[in-house]
Image (cartoon, helix red, strand yellow):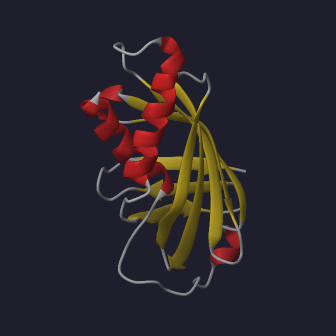
Amino acid sequence: MRRVFNAACGLILAATLTACGGPKEVGPGDSLLIGEWTQDSPISSAGGAVELSDGVVYYAEDGTSRMTAVMSLNAPELPESDRRYRMQADVNWTLDETVLTRTLGTITLKPETETEQSRIIAQQYEAGLNQSPPVRYIIETLDESTLALLDPDTGSTLRYTR
């Protein structure tokens, strides 16, 4: 269970956060980023312990964003009913040339199937993630229809389309 939790924390941070230095103003050239982006394909953590799918991120002009996704745990020790969660995250973002910085405000996880164990798992993930530091992405591609974000810590690229 702890291995799955740690893997999920890393995956969710990679998918929803970005960090560097202190706060900056929303940078020039951010107009292409504004709007709704849909995750191209599921994102898995190393070893496949956690997967995020059906991700949608909306970037607002005021430097805030909202993300929704489905988090699935690959945890054979858990009943199938305790493995899927709906995630919502409020995130603040800044853009400095090609560096997108997103800082998590709050994240909530709701089990798709309410059980005592799924509520406890959701609370544990929320508690850990809501105290996570920000993460940084390098924009590889940003145009009218494509957003590709390189996570310099993992070397993986997150891809989104409109």
* Residue 139, x across and y down, in percent: 49, 64
Q: Where is the N terminus found, in terms of image quarters?
A: top left
Q: Position of residue 91 (x, y in %)?
A: 56, 64
Q: Is residue 6 above or below residue 117?
A: below
Considering depth in this image, is 61 or 68 the residue closer to the camera? 68
* Residue 124 quadrant: top left
State whether residue 53 is above or below residue 98: above
Quadrant of residue 74 within the rendered picture: top left
At 55% across and 71% down in the image, what residue appears?
93
Which residue is found at the position 47% from the left and 70% from the top?
101
The answer to whether residue 18 is left or right of residue 94 is left
Residue 24, compared with residue 112, is above or below; it is below
The percent coordinates of residue 89 (x first, y second) are 58, 54
Q: Image point 65% across, 58% down: which residue?
A: 66
Q: Is residue 112 above or below residue 104?
A: above
| Residue 40 visible (yes or no) | no
> Farthest residue toward the left?
3
Q: Is residue 81 visible?
A: yes
Question: x and y percent of residue 111 in the render?
Answer: 57, 30
- Residue at the extreme front of the image, as rendered: 116
Which corner quadrant of the image does residue 40 belong to?
top right
- Numbered disc total: 0
